[in-house]
Image (cartoon, rainbow, N blue to C red):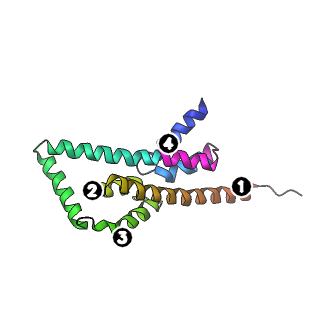
Amino acid sequence: MSGFTDYLLVVGIAATPIIELRGSIPFAIGVLGMSIPVAVALSLLGNILLFIVVYLVGGWWIKLMDSHRSFLSRLTNVVLHRSRRVLGNGQYEKFGLLALTVFVAVPLPMTGVLTGSVAAFLFGVPWRRACLYVFLGMCLAALVVTLITTGVLSFLDFLLKQPTI
């Protein structure tokens, strides 16, 4: 049963804002001793869940705010209209989607799936198109994090080996 809970733990870490793949892949490989393909697959699953939640909650929030007339509703409309006006109608298609992929792919704080998904939602990128470009960015981030993780672990293993005579 511990294998299943380990899997859920990795998915949960990958779905956690800020931590995402940057934390789940090193944890799965370095701490739990998972194979690279399993660690990456579980991390991608958790990360795509985060993307789906952002779009579902965002859509729910917009519907809720449309049915109410309050300060929060007006604030939501201002943020949406301003962010969508910045890119114009479909203007994001030129370089915006490539930028979205690169933004998600960079494994640094304040980048990643959460921030990229919120930006895509605010800019009005259709769900399918955003999903594709965010997923491409996730795969690139997973590759970078996996290479860093395995490289660091290999280097540490090399340093810690005792020379035999």
Q: Nearer the viewer, mark 4 or mark 1?
A: 4
- Give yes or no for residue 88 being in the magenta stretch: no
Q: Which of marks 3 and 4 is in front?
A: 3
Q: Residue 165 placed where, x, y %?
A: 89, 58
Earlier in the chain: of badge 3 and badge 1, it is 3
Secondary element at image label 1: helix
Secondary element at image label 2: helix
Q: Residue 28 placed where, x, y %?
A: 58, 45
Instruction: Give the magenta range.
Output: 30-45
Secondary element at image label 4: helix
Earlier in the chain: of badge 4 and badge 1, it is 4
Q: Distance between the residues labelled 4 and 1?
A: 27 Å
- Amino acid bearing label 2: Leu
Q: How far apart are marks 4 and 2 (CA)?
A: 26 Å
> Circle 2 is placed at which residue position?
122
Q: Which residue lies furthest to the left in this view?
A: 69
> Circle 4 is placed at which residue position?
11
Identify the mark at residue 157; answer none if there is no mark: 1
- At 34% across and 70% down in the image, what residue appears? 94
- Amino acid bearing label 3: Phe
CB under 8 Å between discs 2 and 1: no
Left or right of 164, for residue 146: left
Figure quadrant of the N terminus: top right
Q: Residue 141 placed where, x, y %?
A: 50, 58
Q: Which of marks 2 and 1 is in front?
A: 2
